[in-house]
Image (cartoon, rainbow, N blue to C red):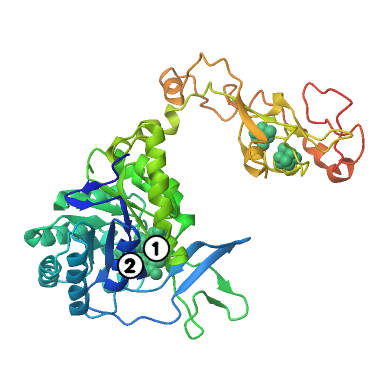
């Protein structure tokens, strides 16, 4: 049985799954319920001078039959008095001494930072997370992402906190910045023990077409909010990778953003996170999702032979290179498995209009055909195909050659002029522009179909959809 427990920069937790600072960690009741369900830790809803929130607060991107693939909020930090929160932190720790309770904090002055750090430490918190990420409301007052976007200010505040901190300090970063490693480095220079990322991304999720106002609407008006949920995972993964690969950051990373199941969590871990935090999924589906998360993670680790979380932290990082280091000699070609094809021809349309005209339709069947010589191996058809494994990408190069853009640059064999005959697409066939005219009509005519192939060929292939 693999060991799921972690020691994250000195914060111990029975498993790497923490609730992120947000509504699910607004009260002792919720945190106790979550721990009882199996969560390993909770980052308390950010504490500071309590705020007044608006109503409504949330917006969502629903895509086709999926609700909340992206989630947006204009909520601020905790609106509950600090004393109530401190009392409840203390109570949770009495019942769950081995679980991680991390106090998320956001205040302004040095004196306030000193005071609140001492308060949450006395209440029994296992760690502190500095919220330098909130992209709405608090940043206008010089807090939240206003700090996360200014590495020097961030460093100064971390230094203030470290003057009095006796428990581990995590700095939570904002993704609303062009280079996430800058605030991450500043956190290290300030003396932080760890970083967590990402907080929400500044966003407008939609506009009401009748009220002419952005969602969520507050008395006919709206404002930009913070975006999170499944849609932001790719952005979070990239930023985590950037921090994990940066030799000047070298801090434990708590991964946040779009984690809904054990697979999402593993992806964060493989790119360098050693704990993970969840907000939107817990708001959407409740605390019970932890059962699938821990069971799935355990099974994955058993299958892969990982004994501890640390056996897998950053395991994918050596395979994340710069583009110029990728092998230009590697080639894949699409392959349609006829037995699986349902004849929807989505692949044909995508390749014909959006890629390289490398799929033809044949007379007498709805199963399209790949024109290998035109296929550049872009993946598009396999991505649009609705049937799992119906289009697979097969390796077609010899497997013996390896040449990168970097090597070509060093060997001075890269294209350097506008009409250079070393350009990648030079020998790739494309139809004449005029072949596009009347194409839709001609698609149905036998004999017109395989205008694609070069050398042009076979008469048995017809565009007939
Ligand atoms: C309604 C809402 C309130 C949030 N409040 C806070 C907060 O008080 N402090 C904080 O650091 N992050 C806050 N966050 C950000 C989350 O902690 C988390 O960083 C973000 O939602 C990304 O994770 P997810 O994709 O799992 O939701 C909030 C997010 C939401 C949706
Ligand atoms: S998209 Fe897939 S299922 Fe549809 S026609 Fe192409 S190969 Fe067949
Ligand atoms: S991989 Fe790209 S180029 Fe090749 S058939 Fe599919 S869509 Fe066309």
Relative height, residue 209 to residue 460 (above, below): below
Q: Nearer the viewer, residue 261 or 321?
A: 261
Position of 407 compared to 65: left or right? left
Label 2 sits on residue: 33
Instruction: Give residue 9's position: percent from left, percent from top.
Output: 19, 48
Q: Nearer the viewer, residue 207 or 300?
A: 300
Q: Quadrant of the C terminus?
A: top right
Q: Which mark is residue 287?
A: 1
Q: Nearer the viewer, residue 43 or 14?
A: 14
Quadrant of the image where one finds ligand 2:
top right
Relative height, residue 83 to residue 447 (above, below): below
Queried on whether the Cβ of the residue with tag 1 lies below 8 angstroms from ligand 1, the answer reads no
Instruction: Give residue 460's position: percent from left, percent from top.
Output: 88, 27
Badge 2, how many Cα within 10 Å: few under 14, some, many 20+?
Answer: some
* Residue 238 in view in this figure: no
Cα–Cα span, label 1 and label 2: 8 Å
Secondary structure of residue under mark 2: helix
Residue located at (67% from left, 45% from top) = 386
Position of 387 compared to 99: left or right? right
* Residue 117 in view in this figure: yes
Queried on whether the Cβ of the residue with tag 2 lies below 8 angstroms from ligand 1, the answer reads no
Which of the 4 quarters of the picture holds residue 128? Answer: bottom left
Q: Which mark is residue 346?
A: none
Residue located at (42% from left, 27% from top) = 325
Secondary structure of residue under mark 1: loop
Q: Quadrant of the N terminus?
A: top left
Instruction: Give residue 449's position: percent from left, percent from top.
Output: 85, 33
Q: Are marks 1 and 2 in contact (CB under 8 Å)?
A: yes
Position of 397 compared to 342: left or right? left
Relative height, residue 81 to residue 242 (above, below): below
Which of the 4 quarters of the picture holds residue 120? Answer: bottom left
Instruction: Give residue 136's position: percent from left, percent from top.
Output: 36, 70
């Amino acid at each position: 049985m693999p060991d799921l427990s972690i020691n994250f920069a000195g914060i111990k937790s029975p498993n790497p799954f923490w609730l992120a600072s947000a509504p699910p960690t607004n009260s002792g009741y919720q945190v106790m319920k979550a721990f009882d369900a199996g969560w390993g830790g909770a980052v308390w809803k950010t504490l500071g001078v309590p705020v007044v929130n608006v109503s409504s607060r949330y917006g969502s991107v629903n895509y086709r039959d999926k609700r909340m693939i992206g989630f947006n909020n204009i909520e601020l930090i905790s609106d509950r008095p600090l004393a109530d929160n401190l009392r409840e932190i203390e109570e949770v720790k009495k019942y769950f001494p081995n679980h991680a309770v991390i106090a998320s904090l956001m205040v302004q002055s040095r004196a306030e930072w000193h005071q609140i750090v001492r308060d949450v430490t006395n209440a029994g918190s296992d760690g502190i997370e500095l919220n330098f990420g909130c992209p709405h409301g608090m940043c206008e007052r010089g807090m939240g992402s206003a700090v996360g976007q200014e590495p020097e200010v961030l460093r100064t505040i971390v230094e203030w906190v470290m003057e009095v901190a006796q428990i581990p300090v995590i700095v939570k970063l904002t993704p609303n910045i062009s280079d996430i490693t800058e605030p991450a480095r500043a956190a290290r220079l300030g003396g932080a023990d760890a970083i967590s990322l990402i907080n929400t991304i500044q966003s407008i999720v939609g506009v009401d077409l009748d009220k002419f106002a952005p969602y969520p609407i507050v008395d006919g008006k709206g404002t930009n909010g913070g975006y999170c949920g499944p849609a932001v995972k790719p952005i979070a993964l990239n930023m985590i990778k950037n921090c994990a690969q940066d030799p000047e950051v070298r801090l434990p990373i708590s991964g946040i953003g779009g984690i809904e199941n054990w697979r999402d969590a593993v992806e964060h871990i493989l790119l360098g996170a050693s704990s993970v935090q969840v907000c939107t999924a817990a708001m959407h589906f409740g605390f019970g999702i932890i059962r699938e998360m821990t069971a799935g993670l355990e099974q994955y680790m058993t299958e892969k032979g990982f004994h501890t979380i640390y056996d897998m932290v950053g395991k994918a990082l050596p395979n994340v290179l710069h583009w110029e280091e990728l092998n230009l000699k590697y080639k894949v070609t699409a392959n349609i498995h006829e037995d699986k094809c349902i004849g929807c021809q989505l692949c044909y349309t995508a390749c014909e209009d959006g890629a390289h005209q490398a799929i033809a339709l044949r007379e007498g069947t709805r199963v399209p055909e790949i024109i290998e010589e035109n296929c550049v191996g872009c993946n598009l058809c396999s991505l649009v195909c609705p049937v799992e494994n119906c289009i697979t990408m097969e390796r077609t190069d010899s497997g013996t050659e390896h040449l990168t853009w970097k090597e070509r640059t060093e060997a001075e064999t890269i294209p350097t002029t506008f009409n250079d005959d070393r350009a990648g697409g030079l020998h790739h066939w494309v139809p004449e522009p005029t072949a596009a005219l009347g194409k839709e009509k001609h698609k149905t005519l036998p004999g017109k179909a395989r205008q694609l192939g070069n050398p042009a060929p076979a008469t048995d292939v017809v565009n007939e959809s």
